[in-house]
Amino acid sequence: MPASKRCVLLLSGGLDSTTLLALAKRDGWTPYVLTMNYGQRHAYEIEAARRIASRYDVADHVIANIDLRAFGGSALTGDIAVPKRGTGRADSIPVTYVPARNTVFLSFALAWAETLSVADLFIGVNALDYSGYPDCRPEYIRAFETMANLATKAGVEGAARYVIHAPLIEMSKREIVELGTTLGVDYSATFSCYDPAPDGGACGECDACLLRKKGFAEAGIHDPTRYATQSA
Amino acid sequence: MPASKRCVLLLSGGLDSTTLLALAKRDGWTPYVLTMNYGQRHAYEIEAARRIASRYDVADHVIANIDLRAFGGSALTGDIAVPKRGTGRADSIPVTYVPARNTVFLSFALAWAETLSVADLFIGVNALDYSGYPDCRPEYIRAFETMANLATKAGVEGAARYVIHAPLIEMSKREIVELGTTLGVDYSATFSCYDPAPDGGACGECDACLLRKKGFAEAGIHDPTRYATQSA
């Protein structure tokens, strides 16, 4: 293994991407951490990303501001109500899906990677628990990788072969929580909720909260999340 | 042909994308026009895009602000000098290449298209005169299209089959100028220069100016561009 393997790693500040960061560090990577601030309803996620990046030895942390709200289209970026307790999953893809989100995020990661002459990109997508999100599936990740190697100077000149690493893609939330716990992840610092209370407490009822709770429960590990409904 | 064919069209305000818009209008498309403001050195390009979009009957015009300068890496977004008279083309890819630019642009176009339930995207890339740009080649465009159909709700559910239209991709600058002239494009309203004078005049010496001049000269059509060097 080379002494320093550099990568660009997408960190949202949630449970999955924080586990991803801990995993990359364990495996000897030097991460350039990228957080996309895409006009979410709340800034708690960005604060969590800052907090987490500062706790790990990373090469750099860039927060890229974009505004997907200009396009509307999702409960996470627009005026559609966040569904509670599965009510948004009547059709196969949840309304919290953000149009082309991972494509936009990976494009920015690719732009930074090309600038840094880095060939490895890490993303914490997960196909099992979020099977309704098309851009979380292995076939999507492979198609992005193929495109990236045709899109870039390094790919065309043969200087690099871009690889999109998605090591959590086939894992259940339980397995992710178990992995992160062995890696010493402090999950109390992470943030997953789609619809937090004004004080930043997690709602406990949106899809992200339900999946997170289920992961901790199935793993038999204490859930350190501060839920707003616990104090209600 | 359906009465209304909707598309998302990327407009920079330059010669190619303005010709693209005129062509799409001739062919009966109703364009949702997207201009990416990516931290260029100058705002003349954005002004040109606004001017041009206002002259055509378009469904909407969104200017999306992103800042690729956070990543550095190009004469168009960073502190590298813009090369004059071909001096930047010593290697095969010009230093004015912006990392992953068309991938970032098409990702935003895809996000908007998905929100609008539009399946057709138009981009004015050109492989002949800019053969040094990897993300202007047909194989890149096809790879993006494949990825887009795996990335999106509409693609997965079979509601749409995304198509990336790049009708200028095999044309020379001369052919583009000839086409645009038959379509009544007012090229004096367009802006191509990488390094304009403070008064907005085109430098006449960067790669974009040289290609543009060559296109008009070879077509035998008067070049209406206001060049700063003409008044020097």
Image (cartoon, coloured by chain):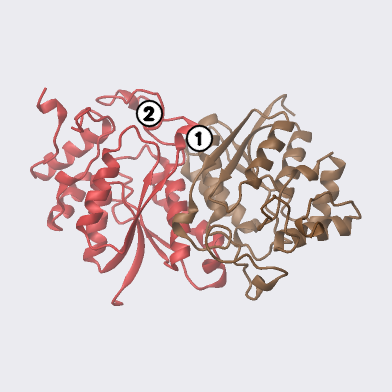
Chain colours: A brown, B red
Q: Which mark is residue A232?
A: none
Distance between the Cα atoms at labels 1 and 2? 17 Å
Evaluate whether residue B171 shows in this view.
Answer: no
Apparent side of residue B209 relative to residue A183 in the rendered image (left or right): left
Residues at discs 1 and 2 both on one chain: no
Q: Residue at left 52%, top 67%? A: B155
Q: Residue at x 50, y 35 (%)?
A: A154
- Report whether residue B10 is seen: yes
Q: Chain of mark 2?
A: B
Along the viewing direction, whichever of A56 and A195 lies nearer the viewer: A195
**Foreground pick, B149 / B228:** B228
In which quadrant will I find the C terminus of chain B? top left
The chain holding disc 1 is A
Residue at mark 1: A154
Residue holding disc 2: B75
> Which element type, helix, strand or loop, lies under badge 2?
loop
Vertical position of residue A30 compared to residue A134: above or below? above
Splitting the image into 4 quarters, where does residue B201 fall?
top left
**What kind of residue is marked 1?**
Ala
B132 or A10: nearer the viewer: A10
Residue A220: percent from the left, percent from the top? Answer: 91, 55
**Which residue is found at the position 65% from the left and 43% from the top?**
A11
Disc 2 residue type (three-letter): Ala
> Left or right of A227: which side holds B50?
left
**Callout 2 crowding tier (Cα within 10 Å): few <14, some 14–19, many ≥20:** many
User: Residue B215: x percent and y percent?
Assistant: 17, 41
Estimate how packed mark 1 is, as few (under 14), some (14 to 19) or many (20 or more) residues with alpha carbons within 10 Å.
many
Given this view, does label 1 or label 2 mark the residue nearer the observer?
Answer: 2
Name the residue at the front extreme. A232
